[in-house]
Amino acid sequence: MREFRGNFRIGRPVFASAEPAAERGILKTAAPNSRQAQRRESALSSCSTMIDQSSASGGNDRNFRKLPHRTEPMDASRPRESVMPVGPQEFRAALGHFASGVCVVTAKGGDGHLAGITVTAFCSVSLDPPLVLISIDKRARLHDALAGGGRFAVNILSADQEVISRQFASSRHDQFAGVGYTTGPDGTPWLEDALAVIECRHAGHYPGGDHTIILGQVETTRIREAKPLMYFRGGYGQLA
């Protein structure tokens, strides 16, 4: 398991000022003396003379040359270069740079069967009322049970629960084998030693591509002090 170390500092943002630079003391200017003014007038006079001579000779003076310019009109009907859509591999690689916590969503099916699935797509939605959402792959075994209503629990894993995360991410049928858990008021499994448990009732679900976004209204919580399990760039880690 990797440890994530780093020092983070919040600094004061720097904004551009509308005040002229000279007034802020950034630029120092000095009034030109009479000799500098004479030199400037002389240079401008020489430049003007050269331009007049070039015009009189049809612009063929060797000191000047015409720059090529576009004569044909712009073709507005010609399509612009299109931006290629991001591919699945590039998309996954970009999202892998977002460090997140790890959760196991657990539920009790209508037949009393307990099931769970490891997810990282979890976030809070609202404080009043208290709402959270999870995103579940439509191919997941637990998908229909979660999208169909009922209750579920979001178990936020602690740093020493990597094995549990891998177990619920696998396709094995006995996911709860060797896993300690208790049950909530309505029989929803709560994993022991989880950093936090958030029990919800189904409050709606919405299509999200190949996933379903499931909204839950929080009804019960339990927390304990520990370090969280982290997931970053395809691997597990923990805070140093």
Image: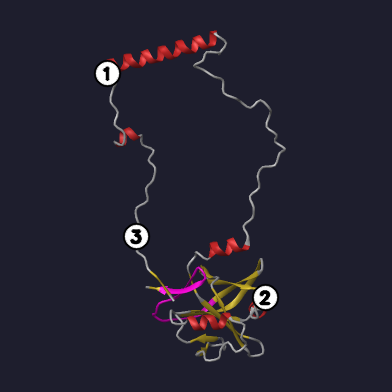
Which residue is at a point 39% across and 79% down the rendered structure image? 226
x then y, percent, for residue 231: 49, 72
Q: Residue furthest right?
A: 77
Reading the image, the residue beneath label 1 is 33
Secondary structure under tag 2 reads: loop
Amino acid, disc 3: Arg
Q: CA distance from mark 3 to mark 2?
A: 42 Å
x then y, percent, for residue 95: 54, 64
**In the image, which residues are magenta?**
218-238
Q: Quadrant of the C terminus?
A: bottom left
Secondary structure mostly seen in the magenta stretch: strand
Q: Quadrant of the N terminus?
A: bottom left
Label of residue 44 in the image? none
Amino acid, disc 1: Asn
Reading the image, the residue beneath label 2 is 139
Residues marked 3 and 2 touching at CB (< 8 Å):
no
In the image, 65 versus 85, the foreground residue is 65
Reading the image, the residue beneath label 3 is 9
Tell me the quarter of the picture where residue 26 sits: top left
